[in-house]
Structure formats: C-alpha cells, structure tokens
Image (cartoon, rainbow, N blue to C red):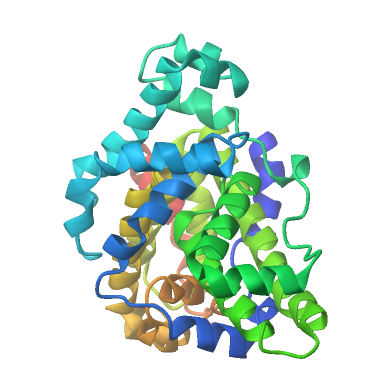
Amino acid sequence: MKAVRLIPFLVLFSYVKCQTLQRSLLDAAMQHTNSQNYLKENLRDIIGIMVAQFLQKSTYEEVQTIVKELLDFAEECQHLKLREPPPECSYQLVATLLEHICNNQGMADKHVFSDCCNINNTARPKCFLLKKKDEADYKDILQIPNPEHICEVNKENQVSVKKRYIYETSRKHPFLYTPTLLAMSTCYETAIQSCCQEENKTECFQIKLESIRRYVREISLRHHHVCEIGIKFNHKVAKAVELVLLTKKLPKANFSDIAKLAVDTKNLHQTCCEGNAVACVLGRSQFMNYTCSKPAILSSKISPCCALPVPFRGECVISSENDDKPDLSPLPLSRFTEDGFVCKQFTERQDDFLQE
C-alpha cells in the first residue's frame, strides 16, 4: 500500500519543467561548460559532492581533506570519456569512503554511523543511505546577507565561491544527483558573476538565486522519492514506476524501447541513489547518448536538448515536455483480456506480459 501512495508524488515531480530557471541564465551558464574534458576537470567537485552528501555534519575543510585523500584512488577515473561505462574505480571510491569513515571512530560517532560500521560490507551502504537527512534540517543557503562581500570574495577567488555552493547544496540535498548539482553550480557561478556587475546587486541575487533554489528543491524532491522507492521496495516496483513515467513521456515509442529505457533508468537511479557520484555522471551521459541517438523513434521534443553540452543536455531531456499523443484507437487491448492465450502468456512470461 505504501508503494501506491508514493507513486503520485513520483508522477508529480517526475519531469519538472525548467521554466523556473531563467533562459538567459541557462544560456550564459552553458557557455562555461567544456564537454571534452568534463569528467577530468570536475572530478574533485564530483568526489566532493559524494563526501558532503554522506558526511552532512562535516565542515567544508573536513570534506576537502577527505576529497584530497580520495583523489589518489581516483587516478584511473580522470582519463575516462563520458561515453565509456563506469569503471571499477568509481565503485571503489564509495567503498573506500565508507571504510575511511568506519576507521575513524570520532567521525563515525559524530555522524551516528557506528551501527553501520558494525555490519558486513554488503549491507553497509544501505545503512549509510538510510542515515541521510534531507534539507528540512538545514537553513536556506541561498540567502545573501551581504552581496558586496560575496562579490568581493568572488572577485578574489571564483573557484572558492562555486565550491562552497557545491558543498552547502550537497549536504542540504543528499539525494540530489551529481549531474544536476554540477549543472546548478554552473548556473550559480554565472548568476554571481552577472549580479556583481549590476548596480542593485541585492535585487539581482534575489531574482536569479531564487529560481535556482526553486529548481534544485523540486528536482531534489523527485530524486529523494525515487531513492525511497529503491530503498524500501524491490526492483520490480522501481521498474514499474519508470515504465509508467516513460510511457507518458514517450507515447509514440514501442514497448521494446520503453522496456529497455525503463531498465536503464532504474539502474541509473540505483547507481545515483547509492551515492556513487562518478558512476552517476558517467551513467547519465551514456543514457543521454542512447536517447539522443534515437530522437525520431523516441520523441521529437528532445532534439534541441541533444545539441547542449554536458550536463545541461541531461537536465533538458529530463525536463522536456511529453511527446504528442498518437492515435491510440487501434491499440489491441483486447488481447490482454479476451485473447484465448492470455493465461498461457501470463504463466510463461508474467513480468513482461504485465508490463506490456
């Protein structure tokens, strides 16, 4: 029954429109993105997101110290291309981080992870995930108490301002997927640079940062609900939810394409929900590559998105409108209720038959 209650929330937040983000802000932010060496250039931030989302009570300095240690294990990941499958190094990063936490008694106690550290490695990741707390316990980080100070700091060190935003947003939204967080950090950086040129900086910050805050909050809710489905229920429920959402979004696609996408989406959600930040970035890119390779079959609405750089391409595809409905009158629905072979097909391939 709980699964049934959760599904409406998933439908509501499944494909949040990008209308809350200003078009000019997105356009400016996308100009600062280099897709060629995206993973290598952002690896430190990607690992920082992973650490801050697990260790929500850690200071910025503590997170950066752990990131520096983990970068030694991530040497292999730096040379990956976004079209390549996630390597073993990306999975080892999560295990190494959890081991690091458990080997530090003070850190484990501070974050109330001691019970997780006392169970076997197989069950440990899920225990850590259940400890994550969403934004309800944190103050709104996008309030700007002193715009002049922010602009002065940004003038001296733009990287520091962006990294602080990534840190604060990561710990506030521990279920927000890494590609989305990276995209929003670029939007945030662009907004700061733009507003610092304005005479009325306070008003500019309020307008531009509020749109980012609203978008992040809505997408974070979506990701949190998806992760709860994966944690609390079996993979069949998660796959069924994706099947429903994808069918509504891509009504012209045939069942085999929808079924494949449902499996791929479920697996991607699982990877991102587990906190595997590197694999989440790589997996999202691969998924978008496949989606963009079949625009005519899947949806004409995603074509403009496919020309965008990483990670905005993914945000655009996910936020795109549902495709136009085709003529559904000739659908042979009677074969699921009146066909003489219904019982035989249901017995032989129950899961596939129910999905179709």
Residue 130 shows in this picture? yes
Residue toward you, 125 or 350: 125
In which quadrant of the rendered image does the C terminus lie? Answer: bottom left
Residue toward you, 190 or 280: 190
Residue 33, placed above or below residue 82:
below
Residue 235, placed above or below residue 187:
above
Q: Image check: 31 left or right of 144?
A: left
Q: Residue shown at 17%/48% (left/top)?
A: 76
Q: Residue shown at 61%/21% (left/top)?
A: 110
Residue toward you, 143 or 38: 143
Instruction: State the image coordinates of residue 180 (x, y, percent, origin top left).
Output: 51, 63
Instruction: State the image coordinates of residue 16 (x, y, percent, origin top left).
Output: 63, 69
In which quadrant of the rendered image does the N terminus lie? Answer: top right
Instruction: State the image coordinates of residue 22 (x, y, percent, origin top left).
Output: 66, 84
The answer to which image quadrant residue 228 occupies is top right
Instruction: State the image coordinates of residue 118 (x, y, percent, origin top left).
Output: 46, 9
The answer to which image quadrant residue 235 occupies is top left
Q: Image check: 295 left or right of 175?
A: left
Residue 27, placed above or below residue 112:
below
Q: Residue shown at 53%/33% (left/top)?
A: 231
